[in-house]
Amino acid sequence: AAGLVTEAEGLRLHLAAGTATGYAGVWTTGKVARPFEAVAGGKRIGRFASVVDAAVCYARHLESGPAAAREWLAACDAKSAEAQRADSDKKREEAVASCAGKGLQTEYKGVQLHLAPGSKTGYAGVWVSGHGSGYRVALEKNGSPPPPPPPP
């Protein structure tokens, strides 16, 4: 149990020697985004990015019941969503900085333009026409890439 957190969020965490995580009621999932799962009574309580968050959820479930565990899961989900937004904002700022040196606009007439620093045009969904005389635009539908341009 060396190196394991024994208390968090005002709760004593339940250690379990010989388990993959070191905590009772916490399993590894093999998922990248949320590799830890809290389980009580044979039922999944939630999946977490942090082993300590999963252990806190398990402890809350045991000490205060399922509603307290669900509240903790919701708080962790909100924290994760905020971190993802911050990461997305940071990536956008980096893309803007990368494209700024190329003279690309990030906004036009109040509309945010989506930058794609690795593309030939610098913009997402915009490519040079196969005819070499202009640009072609296609919108993605539900995250699916646009169809390829027609042959010249």
Image (cartoon, rainbow, N blue to C red):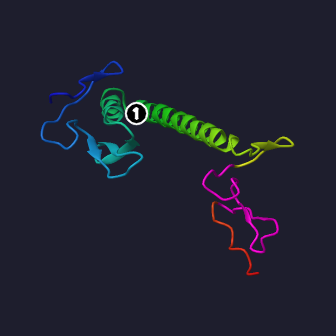
In this rendering, the answer to whether 53 lies above or below 111 is above
Query: Helix, strand or loop at disc 1?
Result: helix
Q: Quadrant of the C terminus?
A: bottom right
Q: Residues within 10 Å of mark 1 (few under 14, many from 20)?
A: many
Residue 45 screen position, x and y as percent:
37, 42
**Residue at (74, 65) in percent of width and height:** 128
Residue 141 lies in quadrant: bottom right
Which residue is most to the bottom?
A: 151
Q: What x and y, as percent, mark residue 63?
A: 31, 26
64 relative to 89, above or below: above
133 left or right of 82?
A: right
User: What secondary structure is the magenta-colored segment mainly?
Assistant: loop
- Please report the bounds of the magenta region as a residue range: 115-142
Q: Amino acid at mark 1?
A: Ala
Image quadrant occupied by the N terminus: top left
According to the image, label 1 marks what residue? 69
Where is residue 136 shown, x and y percent of the image? 78, 66
